[in-house]
Image (tube, rainbow, N blue to C red):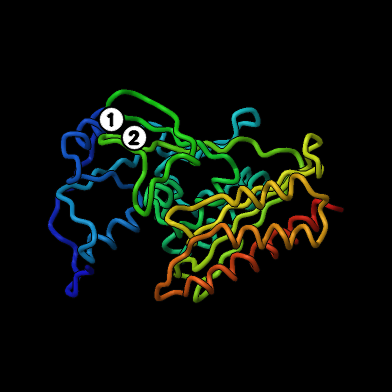
Amino acid sequence: MINPHPGLPELEYVKPASLSEACAFLAEHEGKAKPFSGGTDSFVRLRDGVLKLDYLVDIKGLDGTKELSFDPKKGLTIGAAVTMNQVAKHPDVIKYYPILVQAADSVASYQLRNRATIIGNICNASPAGDTIGTCLVLDGVLNVEGVNGKRSIPLSSFFLGPGRTVLNAGDVVISITLPTPPAGMVGVYKKLGRNKISDLSIVGVAVMGYPNSKSPSGYTFRIALASVAPTPMEALKAEAILAEKPITPETLALAAETAMDAVTPIDDVRGSARYRKLMVRNLTREALTEVWAKLGK
């Protein structure tokens, strides 16, 4: 229940000197402490009484959290403290990952994006996270530090449900790595909200495609959907249709219908389940058509 008299509660700010110190503190205070960088979601939830904590652990400046780098062999690495505006303005992101620029620019307002981070958007684990779908179709891998050392977690296996992930007590997501996109990749992110800024997505659709001689159709497409299931999801059956059948307007329409059939949205104040399903079909068809128009030239 949302607090009818919102206001930030009293809590303790913790600034660890190292990742190991941060992980140890978070593990020791499981359920009472949370790491933060931008804090754009955490502060709202604390204010409204949805999130109850005793400690906020500031991870800005810890090893790897400010990294924003591209290597043609390794791909793009985005640290936990890198803001969405920093990502969207980076020349290598603009050149190689324009779909990520579209997704980042769709989040809230410019001012908020000066604090909001890609990692925060992911770790919030909201079904409506705007940058999550794009990172899914780009095969993102999270780099995590915990009390037992480092490990990598594919984004596709990160989410368990709304607000729930596979992270353990003491885990800190340091960064995400997005592999170098396949040659010829084209991507589009479509968002439907109640207004053009500052609103959560009613439906979000990320589509990317690229030539693939090993695919019967000659192409591979990836489709990720937001705000239409307990977690951000890929439309795997729709992707399979696009891999197996010749790419025609009819095939694109069939894939969009298949994506619609795969979702399980809910009714809420931003839209009904039926409306969301129809918008999945429409936005997916639009995105596929735009991608194919560039790929098929």
Residue 246: give x, y in percent of width and height: 83, 50
Give SS at disc 1.
Answer: loop
Real-space CA distance between mark 1 and mark 2, rounded to the nearest whole angstrom: 6 Å
Tell me which corner region of the image, top left, top right, bottom left or bottom right, holds residue 65. top left
Disc 1 crowd rating (10 Å Cα; few below 14, some 14-19, many 20+) is few
**Horizontally, is 26 left or right of 151 in the view?**
left
Q: Earlier in the sequence, mark 1 or mark 2?
A: 1
Q: Amino acid at mark 1?
A: Ser
Residue to which mark 2 is pinned: 62
Mark 1 vs 2: CB contact within 8 A:
yes
In this rendered view, identify the residue nearer to me: 110 or 190: 190
Tell me which corner region of the image, top left, top right, bottom left or bottom right, holds residue 113. bottom left
**Horizontally, is 248 left or right of 176 in the view?**
right
Q: Amino acid at mark 2?
A: Leu
In this rendered view, identify the residue nearer to me: 194 or 156: 156
Residue that appears at 56% across and 52% down: 88
Residue 253: give x, y in percent of width and height: 73, 63
Disc 2 crowd rating (10 Å Cα; few below 14, some 14-19, many 20+) is some
* 194 up-or-down from 31: above or below: below
Residue to which mark 1 is pinned: 18
Residue 196 appears in the figure: no
Where, quadrant-wise, is the N terminus in this rendering?
bottom left
Residue that appears at 70% across and 65% down: 286
* 111 up-or-down from 234: above or below: below
